[in-house]
Amino acid sequence: MARFGLAARGVIYILIGWLAIELAIGHSAQQPNQVGALQLLASKSYGLITLWLIGIGFVGYALWRLSEAAFGVTGEGNGAGPRIKSLVRGIVYAFLAYLTFQVISGSSSNQTHKQQDLTAKVMHHTGGQWLVGLVGLIIAIVGVTLVIEGIKHKFMKQLRTGEMSRRTRMVVERLGMIGTTARGVVFAIVGALIIDAAVTFSPKKSGGLDKALLTLRHQAFGEFLLLIFAVGLLIFGVYGLCEARWRRV
């Protein structure tokens, strides 16, 4: 189930990367985020079966991460840090499974607007502004951590590299480095947007992957920047399929 979940994650990032590429060249009809990727699948003739498989994969991935939180992370001992990371990942992918089944039932809606509404509700409670800022800071730190992991190739220690040929290992290492770094930068932007929303008390400034990618697009040479990171996310998806094959679980 863990490998099935890793493969589902890879497929979703490939689709998000593709949607972001379409956004960069001005041809996007879907949000470049998880819901947009799922809706893109839903529009295909094979979409319903694929969505069910991805939804089940996300459930499997979430259960795997939650089991790591409960019993310890393979190769990283029983420290609190790895367990907490697995707990957060388990919750995130349980939510992605929920989104997938919402798309299957036809009841999905704009993910960014939902996040902005939730941010607004939290910020209007006592201490809510600080809580939103803290969430943004955590996401930004996760993003920076991913960038460091990508640059230093730390992800390779999670793979069964002994089963790869020299050429395969080199290709997987390049895919992981580019993809993980790009994903980290996008996560850091998401965190920065949430922090900015908290500091300025403006929930509309917050958002997910789509908001982060649109932020890139609105910078100088934005289409070029967006295209680079879109390709990076697509590459992370391809790396994710490799991880499904060779990761230690």
Image: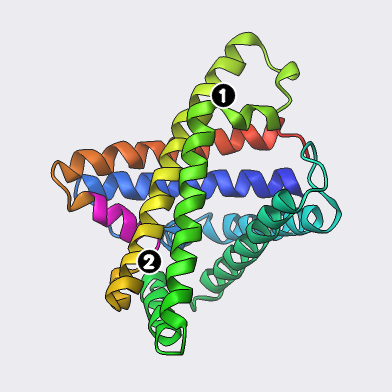
Measured along the vertical axis of the image, is residue 234 above or below residue 49? above
Q: Quadrant of the C terminus?
A: top right
Q: Secondary structure at mark 1?
A: helix
The residue that mark 2 highlights is: 194
Q: Amino acid under label 2?
A: Ile
Give the class, few, some or many, for how many residues have Cα within 10 Å of label 2's Cα (few <14, many ≥20). many
The residue that mark 1 highlights is: 172
Q: Residue 124: within the magenta?
A: no
Q: Position of residue 178 (x, y in %)?
A: 44, 30
Left or right of 128 in this view: 79: right
137, 208: nearer the viewer: 137
Q: Position of residue 219 (x, y in %)?
A: 17, 49
Q: Secondary structure at mark 2?
A: helix
Q: Is residue 209 shown to the viewer in this render?
A: no
Q: Quadrant of residue 196?
A: bottom left
Ranked by sequence position, the earlier of labels 2 and 1 is 1
Q: CA distance from mark 2 to mark 1?
A: 33 Å
162, 245: nearer the viewer: 162
Q: Residue at x 62, y 60 (%)?
A: 93
Q: Residue at x 27, y 40 (%)?
A: 227
* The residue stretch that appears in magenta: 208-216
Q: Amino acid under label 1?
A: Val
Q: Is residue 46 shown to the viewer in this render?
A: yes
Q: Position of residue 49 (x, y in %)?
A: 61, 58
Q: Position of residue 119 (x, y in %)?
A: 41, 78
Left or right of 87 in this view: 150: left
Q: Residue 213: within the magenta?
A: yes
Measured along the vertical axis of the image, is residue 111 above or below residue 127? above
The extreme right residue here reads: 71
